Amino acid sequence: MSTPERSLSDGRFLVAFACGLVAVGILCLVFVLAGQPDTAAGALVGGLAVTGLALVVRWRAKRRGPTADGGFSRTLLGTTDERDKAILTASLAWVGLTAFLANAIGLAAVALGADGSTVIGAIEALLIAVLVGAFVWLSRRT
């Protein structure tokens, strides 16, 4: 399997990081203008936490280098080979199937009286778990 020569450059990452910060700022501003300062504070803290986490993950992946063990590190650095791309694609296919079924079940749960925000949180947690589980399972299997 060949490894492509290109990788995720620092410039591209910084543009994506800056766009994330701008999006967090705009979201916070929209909530403040709508008269919801508590929601704005939550969006600001959550958005900054996610962008900070992205920065830490990128730093760890860069520190290990493009020859890092594991497809996840190679995916973050943009140096995946055909096998890594196939595993990621198959993992996302499992997430798509699970999302379709989980949303149908969530709709029924809300119709039966479940709290909507709880159902959305449960679906999100389920999809993340399926992505991680499928990625690990397919990595070990192939």
Image: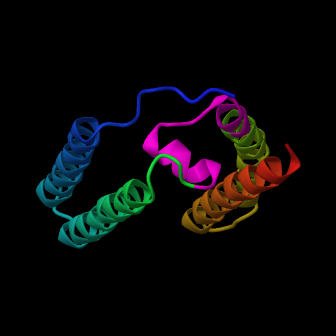
Magenta stretch contains residue 79: yes
Comparing 102 with 128, the one in front is: 128
The colour scheme of the drawn protein is rainbow
Magenta stretch contains residue 18: no
Comparing 88 with 68, the one in front is: 68
Residue 72 location in percent, x, y? Answer: 58, 51
Comparing 4 with 127, the one in front is: 4
Report the residue at 20% width, 51% height from top. Answer: 21
Residue 39 figure quarter:
bottom left
Comparing 61 with 127, the one in front is: 61
Magenta residues span 69-87
Whether 106 is drawn above or below 41: the answer is above
Magenta stretch, main secondary structure, is: helix
Q: In the displayed structure, does residue 141 sit left or right of residue 14?
A: right
Residue 91 location in percent, x, y? Answer: 72, 42
Q: In the displayed structure, does residue 134 sit left or right of residue 77?
A: right
Report the residue at 68% width, 57% height from top. Answer: 132
Q: In the displayed structure, does residue 70 sit left or right of residue 130?
A: left
Q: Quadrant of the C terminus?
A: top right
